[in-house]
Structures are given as C-alpha cells and as structure tokens.
Amino acid sequence: MARVYFKRLVAAATIGLGVALAPALKADSLSDALVSAYLESNILDQNRALLRAADEDVAQAMAGLRPVINFVSQSNFRFPARVGGIKVNNWTSSIALNLRLVLFDGGVTRYATEAAKETVLGLRAALLDLEQQVLLNAVQTYMEVIRASQAVSLSQSNVRLITQELRAARDRFEVGEVTRTDVSIAEARLAAARGNFAASQGDLEVAREAYKAAIGRYPDQLRWPPAPPMTARNEAEAKAVAVRRHPSISQAQRNVNAGEANVARALAAIGPTISASASTSLDDQESYDKSASLTIDVPIYAGGTRRSLLRQAKARRDAARVALLQSVVVVEQNVGIAWANLSVAAATTEASRRQVRAAQVAYDGVREEAKLGARTTLDVLNAEQELLDARSSLISAETQQYVQVYALLASMGLLTVEHLKLGIVTYDPADYYNAATANPLRKISPQGAKLDKLLKSLGKN
C-alpha cells in the first residue's frame, strides 16, 4: 500500500504542482533545507552542550579511584612579638605535599561510573530524537511554504477570473441580457476573492517566517521534492522497526541500566572504605616531616541515611522499568497513528484529485451554457468557486500526504541525517567523551589540548 501511495504522490506532484513551482536555476531542494536545519539548529547545539556536560559526569565519577595530590603553602604571624621577655620570630612558613588514594570503596566508584555512562548513552539517544524533531519540522515548514505559495497563485488566478466574469456581466447588463442583480453578485464575489487573496498572502508570510526559524534563512524558489523514502510494507513491520530503532526506547533502556547501577552503588556504600594517605612538609627552619597512614572507614550508624538512599535508588530503578514499558506502548501507538494519518492523507488526495476533475468539467459546462443563456452569472460563479475549493483541497492534501510520510519515518525512529543519506558530516558525541574520560595520569597535556581543540571546532572556546 505504501508503494502505491508514493507513486500517486509523485504523479500528483508532477501534474498538480509542477508547472506553478517550476524551479529557478538556484532553487532550494528539500535536502538543502534539511541540511541547513540540522546545521543551524539552536536546539541541537543546546543539547549537544548538555551532553558534553554529562560526559564530564563520567570523568568526575572515574576520578574517585584516582590519587588526589595537593600542594599546600602556609605562612603564620604570631602575636605577641615577645614571649617571657624573649623576642620570637613572628613569621613562620611551611610547604607540604599531600597525597590521598582510595584503595577500596566496595565498588561505589565503579557503579557510579557505570550509571554516568548509561546516562550519557541515554542522552545521546535523546539527542537523536531531537534530531528527528528538527528534521520533521523542516519538512513541515518546507511543504507549508509550497502549499501557501500555491494558494497565493490560485487565489490570484481566481481574482483575475472573477474580474473577467464581472466585466462580462456588465457587458451583458448593458445589452439587457442580465439584471443589475447579476452584476452585484459578481462584484461581491470579486471582493471576497480579493479578501481571500490578501489572506493567502498573509499565510505565505507566516509560512516564510516559520521556514526561517526552522531552516535558518528565508525561502527562495522551492522545488517540489522527489518521491519520499520508503517506510515499511505494512503497519506491523513499521511497529517492529520502531521498537528496535526508536531513540526514546533506547533512552528508556539506558535509564533502566543506570538505575540498576545506582542500586548497586547505594548497596556498596553501606560497606567499608579503605584509603591511604602520605605527606611531606618543610618549614622555614629546614625541618622535614614525613608521614603515611592507612585508614579503614567502616560505617556503623548514620541515622538511616544509607538505607534510605538504597530504597530510593530501588524506587527510581522500578520507575525507570515502568517508563521503558510505557515508552514501547507510546512508540507503537504513534506508529499506528502515523500509519492511519498517511492512509487518510492518501485517500484524501485521491478524492480531491477526482473532485478537481469533476469540478473542472462542471465549470466548463456551466460557462458554455451561460453563453447560450441557459445559466445565470450566479451559476457560473458558484461553479468557479467549487473548482477553486477543489483545487485548494488538492494542494493541501498533496502536501499533507508528503509530510505524513516523514512523520511515519519519525515515529519509526528513521528520520535521521544518516538514514536519509543527506551526505554531510554529523556531530559525533564520542569525540568529546573519549577525550574527557581519558586517563589523565597517562596523557594530561595531550588530552587537555584535544579538548581545547574540540571545543574550538565547535565555536565554544
């Protein structure tokens, strides 16, 4: 059924809209609009920054089992200057180097790192879902400009046609073939047509502003897009693809994994912690002091805080599990709605096409009969209005059908730059993540330089 829809859609585009939308040499295509929307999206930039912030959560969690080294420099001024009549040195200074290392924490750091990693992967899926929304909005605004442009052309032609009918009615009134009533009816219809023309121009301006907000620039000449990409052979197949591919389900699964890791982290926090520390210091009297210690911290009673944190982590994990189940339900529902909308749009397009053919035949017949005196001016104007309404409905139906194909792709999780093969380099979140989480003991300066380079390439540094 979907293949039939696509063939009819292409035919309708060629016959119904091809002439009026004959592109200029530099006309924009839908692919151009999608690429621009992806590259210029403030929403995507905002959430990429939030994802980079989450990457730093992983780096901070991983630092829990790495050594902490501090350099301390201290100066003291002593009052009074004399003690027991003996003058003393007011100023004393010292420097020290302290090191602390957690040897064992029961897995708290490891589970915290796992939870942070799963959260990052979930946010990557959320970013992909936002990419779908940005691209779908681009398709909608692109097709709305086309529809509004066609509506302007159609209403402008209607004004010209009714002007001719008014001129003919006045000529016939002069020779006594019609009454003043016929002329007044034509004048009223012309006024209404001019109002519709003004309204359609306003709709086009609104569509142009929406296009600029979504794409990043005002539209020029827009080409009617080619046949949209294939979706699925049937609704069941579309739902199966969506369950496997949709980013919202992937994000929900990652949230469950993070919840499991947080439960393990809360449980590990109840156990003991072993840490080691060492320090060396030197004062202004050239006195050295060195020390080392091993600390075992066994929690005995903390007012119930740790047990409460464990129960809280389990509750959040359970909520994430239910959210995963619900996300599958919502995704399947959205696929079903999108499939139904596409079916309705295809049927509406076919019905509108038949309506236009019948209305054109009726209008031609009424005009010929009016020339013979068998029809009144009102009959001609009514027939012309029905033809105008039919053409307007066809334009709306064709553009809506095209949008619904992409809406179905979005509901399946396939409306991405990669799946559409737009041929541009996409944002790779792994670059920043790998640089941010690299072991600083091995490559402190190179990793810092790489992070600076990445941020600079993003225009953030």
Image (tube, rainbow, N blue to C red):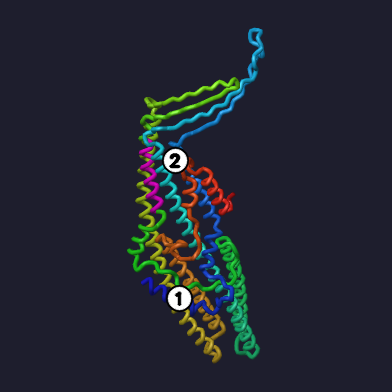
Amino acid type at mark 2: Met
Q: CA distance from mark 2 to mark 1?
A: 55 Å
Question: Residue 274, image x and y in percent?
Answer: 39, 29
The residue where tag 1 is placed is: 10
Of 233 and 430, the residue lying toward us: 430
**Residue holding disc 2:** 62
Q: Answer few, some or many: residues within 10 Å of disc 2's Cα (few below 14, many 20 plus, some between 14 and 19).
A: many
Chief SS of the magenta region: helix
Residue 285 occupies quadrant: top right
Amino acid type indicated by mark 1: Val
What numbered label is drawn on residue 284? none
Residue located farthest toward the top when viewing the structure as drawn: 84
Q: In this view, which residue lies farthest toward the left?
A: 236
Q: Against 60, is 199 above or below? A: below
User: Is residue 264 found inside the magenta-colored segment of the image?
Assistant: yes
Which mark's residue is nearer the viewer, 2 or 1? Answer: 2
Mark 1: few/some/many CA within 10 Å (<14, 14-19, 20+): some
Q: Is residue 41 magenta?
A: no
Q: Which residues are magenta?
A: 249-266
Residue 287 in picture, x, y percent from top left: 56, 20
444 vs 87: above or below: below
Q: Nearer the viewer, residue 182 or 96?
A: 96
